[in-house]
Image: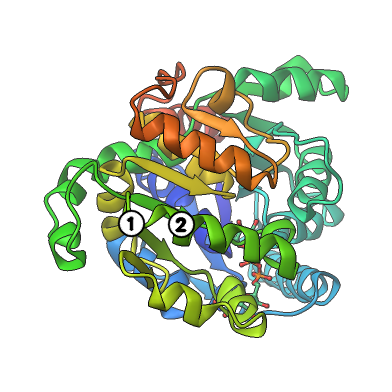
Amino acid sequence: MHLVCVVGARPNFMKIAPIMRALKAFPQIKTTLVHTGQHYDQNLSDVFFQELGISEPDISLGVGSGSHGRQTADILAAMEQVLIECAERKDPVDRLVVVGDVNSTMAASLAAAKLCIPVAHVEAGLRSFDRTMPEEINRIVTDSLSDMLLVSEPAGMENLRREGHAESELHLVGNVMIDTLRQHVESARQRNTLSKLGVSSGEYVVVTLHRPSNVDQRESLTALVDVLVATSPTLPVIFPVHPRTLSRLEQFGLTERLKSAARLQILPPQAYGDFLCLTSQAKAIVTDSGGLQEESTALGVPCLTMRANTERPITVDVGTSTLLGGDCQKLEQCLQSVIKGRYKTGRCPELWDGKASERIAAILGKEAR
Ligand code: UD1
């Protein structure tokens, strides 16, 4: 069986790594790894391949950045070409494997579905019910094109049932990103990342923000910067900045404010191990990332989520996340309750046990028999 696995953007890499590894146990499966090039910066892409031990992509499409339409169209056309060439070389593709909810996920699925190649979607069924999020559109389209839906939390199963998927297509397998976290967390904690930054375990907050709803408007980004600056004297702030956010901070003249706050450090996007070293020992995490909501739940670290909704409800119901929308007053209150030790403690969801990718490989392996 020939599987084509697709990655494109940073959050895809930690999801595909354990799957590629688990598939090695199945000699009857040949894999081809395609990198669309949606993320192309060294520190958003290459560094993850090196650290997570993912083999070099067999095919790199190099599509790069663009509007959603342009980027999706470029990936669609390039993926179609890849899949057709495989068939022409008498090495036809039996199944496409996609992960997550980025533009690469959706565009690759569409290329395969049009060529009648079945699609397996890892992290299927998640719904924020907010169609203003580009990722929500990507999730809906990808799931509707997939016939193997590999789900990380029970809400995903309910969503897919409601959307009419057959029970035989659904598999609750757990969370592959947590497989990667469990594999790396002990060695990550041994790194000297904290001492290099001059912070101590449990005595700082990690911040990541990149969603348009938080960073694209001057007022919302300014309000967030104000809270971070006000928090830093009590609790040092470590803020690795996504390229999109950096350009907005500069555009709105906020970079100097951040740089002049004494115990607030802005950093470039961090490599996996350094970032895990930081998040696993943080007092709290402030974020709008979907993946980080899950990682903080697995780590038991309070997660103050600057979003009005989440496609990952288990991180709120069972885990350590609280949804704050864009409410910076609530953010300040939550930070206070963390500092005073009054914030809720969560627990780790079932099947977030480091073995999700083995369960996925077993399902794919069964098909290859
Ligand atoms: C993408 C995903 C988002 C994910 C995020 C993680 C979509 C719709 N969004 O958002 O779900 O949470 O990745 O990081 O797929 N850029 C660089 N270097 C790069 C890549 C991008 O500087 O290597 C800049 C470019 O100016 C680009 C912008 O970042 O236009 C946005 O990149 P893009 O891939 O379109 O979306 P992200 O915001 O990264």
Q: Is residue 176 visible?
A: no
In screen coordinates, is 105 left or right of 165?
left
Identity of the residue drawn at 49% across and 47% down: 286
Q: Position of residue 320 (x, y in %)?
A: 46, 27
Q: Secondary structure at mark 1?
A: loop
In the figure, residue 121 lies in which quadrant?
top right
In the figure, residue 110 lies in which quadrant?
bottom right
Mark 2–mark 1 CB contact (< 8 Å)? yes
Q: Position of residue 247 (x, y in %)?
A: 61, 81
Q: Position of residue 123 (x, y in %)?
A: 61, 37
Task: Quickly name the residue at label 1.
Answer: 233
Q: Amino acid at mark 1?
A: Pro
The quarter of the picture where the N terminus appears is top right
* Numbered disc total: 2
Task: Quickly name the residue at label 2.
Answer: 230
Assign ligand 1 to one image quadrant. Answer: bottom right
Q: Does ligand 1 reach within 8 Å of label 1's beta carbon? A: no
Q: Position of residue 9 (x, y in %)?
A: 56, 64
